[in-house]
Image: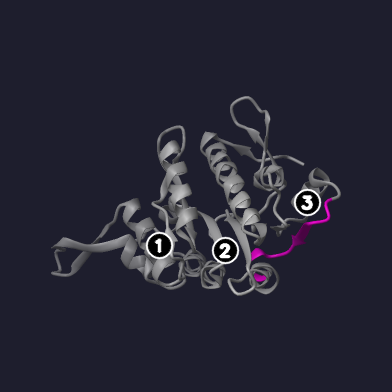
Amino acid sequence: MNLDEIGPWSEIKLDILRDYAAPYSRILKTNGFHHGYIDAFSGPGLHTRKAGGEEVLGSPLVALEVQPPFDEYHFIDLDGAKVDFLKRQVGSHPHVTFYNSGSNQVMLESVLPRFSYAKRTRALCVLDPYALTLNWEVVRAAGVSQAVEVFINFPVMQMNRNCKQVNISEILPGELQAMDRFWGDRSWHSAMFRPSAQQNLFGEEDLDKTENRDLVNAYCKRLNEVAGFGFVASPLAMRNSRKAIVYYLLFAGPNKTGWKIVQDIYRKYG
């Protein structure tokens, strides 16, 4: 199959995952926790580098290289061709489960219920959705479990492209609904637009676009206050070759140790 091309920012994301997954797995294994790895939008497991065309391991194969290994792996993708390709890359592995289905439903019904504070089961989850296809209910379920740590791709460039209309009634219905599902409610609009200091010609209050940082910080606040994650790292801006922010890489989890490790890793790449 034709593999997706990725830029340097995507390779940095994979390096961050590699840098974090190893100590995460080691700490949990040492302390006797059964722990899993979840890739909710796994893709085919391989990419090609834009500059040069070399193959680059995707996040599922990166996770399978981590030592000590996770006790179980869950790879989910709606695209059957990508799932089949990933299966061929993984080969026979007794602790890997593949799902060719919609990620949101599989996560809520089959995967996340396996991990909870009470059962002493833990998981590291990568939520790197295609467009705005991640539902807030999945994020909130991970937070409520008190057992799952998440890396989230916060696609601010696409959000700005799809929801650039100040008047909410002018945003396309499909884009509006996708943003509502991703955010969990419509409070994203007040995070994206703030009242202007000036009124328009009709004496009505105008709205000004906020900065990208304001929007992502509002989402991080929701991760803490609404989803229930105890620790949320400062967002890491991932930039393309023109220095434009493509997305923010977010981390949230239930314990301070993981948060401190991620903060150190982010400073390295920041």
Q: Quadrant of residue 119?
A: bottom right
How far across and down, in percent of the image, does residue 101 sit?
A: 73, 64
Q: Which residue is mark 2?
A: 148
Amino acid type, callout 2: Val
In space, the residues marked 1 and 2 are separated at their CA atoms by 18 Å
Residue at disc 3, secondary structure: helix
Q: Quadrant of residue 159?
A: bottom left
The label number, if any, that marks residue 75 in the structure image: none
Taking the image as shown, residue 233 lies to the left or right of residue 149, namely left
Task: Identify which residue is drawn at 71% across, 44% down.
Answer: 61
Give the residues in magenta. 93-105
Assess whether mark 2 and mark 1 are in contact (beta carbons under 8 angstroms): no
How far across and down, in percent of the image, does residue 155 sit?
A: 48, 53
In this orientation, does residue 252 appear? Answer: yes
Amino acid type, callout 3: Ala
Q: Which residue is mark 1?
A: 219
* Label located before the other in sequence (1 or 2): 2
How far across and down, in percent of the image, does residue 113 sit?
A: 65, 73
Q: Nearer the viewer, residue 82 or 45?
A: 45
Q: Quadrant of residue 264?
A: top left
Viewer-side label of 1, 3: 1
Q: Which residue is mark 3?
A: 81
Assess whether mark 3 and mark 1 are in contact (beta carbons under 8 angstroms): no
